[in-house]
Structure formats: C-alpha cells, structure tokens
Amino acid sequence: MSLFHIFVVAVIQGVTEFLPISSSGHLILIPALTDWPDQGRGIDVAVHVGTLFAVLIYFWRDVLAAFNGFLLLLVGRVTQGGKLAFALIIGTVPVVIAGYFAAKTGLIDQMRSAEVIGWTMLGFGIVLYLSDKVGMKIRRIEHITVVSALIIGLAQILALIPGTSRSGITMTAGRFLGYETHAAAHFSMLMSIPVILAAGLLDGLDLYEKGELALGSDAIITAALAFLCAIGALAAMMAWLKHAGFTPFVIYRVLLGAGLLWWVYS
C-alpha cells in the first residue's frame, strides 16, 4: 500500500468509527469508487487497535468504574459501575451471536455493495432524525437498565448491514427509549469497546493462525493515524451533542445515500 492509501484508510476509519455515519460503509466504498485494492485484514486489525485505544482513553473513568464494578459483582457487591458493566455485557451478546452466524453463512459479504450502503445510509439516517425529534429526554446514562441495554443491543445487530452505522443505530435506539442525546451517545461509545475488541481479536487470531499477522510499518502508521483521528472526532462529537442534536449527521447521511443511489441506478 502507498503512504497516501494508508493515510486515507486511517483517516476515514478514525473519523467515521464513532460518528453515526458508518465506518464500514465508507471503507467498502474506497475500492468501489477508486481503482485501489482492498486494504486487507491486517490493516483492518491496525485501525481497530487505533480506535480501541482512542475510546478507552477518552472514557477511561467509565472503563475503570465498569471494570472495578464487574469484579465487585463477582463477590456479590452491586455498584453503579457493576450495573454499567452488566448492561454492556447484555448489550454486546446479541451482535456477537448474530455476527458469528452472519460471517459463517457469508451473509455479510453478500451485502457489501454501494447499493446496500446507499439505502441504509438514507433509510437509517431518516430514522436517526425521527428518534432525535420524537424521543423524550428523561434518562441519563446512570439510568441504564438491563431491558434498555438488551433493546439497544438487539438494534446493534442491524449494524451488520453495511452503511447502517453501529453508533448510529444504537444512538437511535437510545433516543427512542428516552435517553438524552448525550447519554445515548455516551452509552453507544462504551458499547463500542467490547465490539471493537472482539472484532479485532477475531481478525487478529485468524491472521495469526494463517501466518499473515505482521507488525509492519504500514500497520503501525495506520494504527497511530486512526487513533489520532478517532480521539479528535470522538471529542468533537461528544462536545457537540451536549448542546445540539444529530441533524448534521442526518444531512450527511441523506446526501451520501441519495448520491450513491443516483450513481448506482443511473
């Protein structure tokens, strides 16, 4: 891969990983709209590492509280951190199960097309807008329940469809459940940690077993760039959502989705 190709992949993944505009959809579009080859799974693992470190560092207090709370749960003590950890586990299980079967059946590969991304960008962008307009704002992240976590986790399964956006669909579900915009985004970002970790580990182990996992300069540069872009985009989005809504992301999704569908069908 050329340095420019690495830069583009890392920046796109880093910026779009946590914004509700679908990182996977954008990465699929790179080879579809250019003559560049697929970046390969080794680079995918590298960007996962970069974005994982970004969200761990940005939400380090929540991560530490959830980890300590989980350990206390094991000895029968219930804390706010333990409740958060349990909610994250409940919210992660559905997509792990669905993702496993989707990968084994080849369903995910069958959906990797500009046409699918166009429709999901457009459709779920409109649903995101509706959730922000009709959803009540009566709950904060400390009000997260097992039922809410399960519903958001079930919604996260839809993110297996390219262009849906994992963060977008979980924020949408959170807003429909009455969580404040910032709180819905906060829980969505915490939910990304086990998902990114699982995806990175599965890809990494598979590449290791095949003898294809190598810590080369391309991977290091990609991970570093993805980290910097991800933590910047994450900080900007969380600051924005304290005082505003999802409208800019909705506009972007609708324009991109409509543009892709015009390109596909023209």
Image (spheres, rainbow, N blue to C red):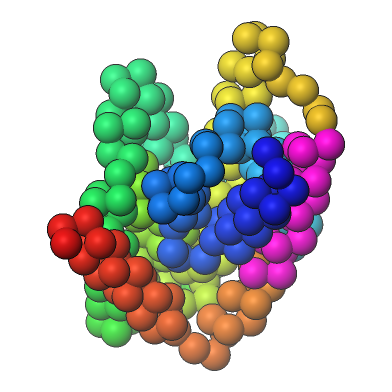
Residue 94 is drawn in which quadrant? top left
Location of residue 231 in the rendering, given as x and y in whole percent from the top left corner: 72, 64
Q: Name the side, left or right, on which 105 lies relative to 223.
A: left
Q: Is residue 81 above or below residue 235?
A: above
Quadrant occupied by the N terminus: top right
Q: Of 212 and 203, which appears nearest the observer?
A: 212
Q: Main secondary structure of the magenta part?
A: helix
Q: Of 221 and 237, which appears nearest the observer?
A: 221
Magenta stretch contains residue 19:
no
Query: In the rendered image, is residue 134 in sight?
Result: yes
Magenta residues? 217-233
Identified at 27% across, 32% down, the residue is: 110
Identified at 22% across, 56% down, the residue is: 264
Location of residue 144 in the rendering, given as x and y in whole percent from the top left corner: 47, 61
Magenta stretch contains residue 229:
yes
Identified at 38% across, 25% down, the residue is: 103
Q: Of 113 and 83, which appears nearest the observer?
A: 113
Quadrant occupied by the C terminus: bottom left
Q: Name the side, left or right, on which 154 lies relative to 8.
A: left
Q: Is residue 20 above or below residue 57?
A: below
Identified at 71% across, 69% down, the residue is: 232
Q: Of 12 and 2, which appears nearest the observer?
A: 2
Location of residue 201 in the rendering, given as x and y in whole percent from the top left corner: 63, 27
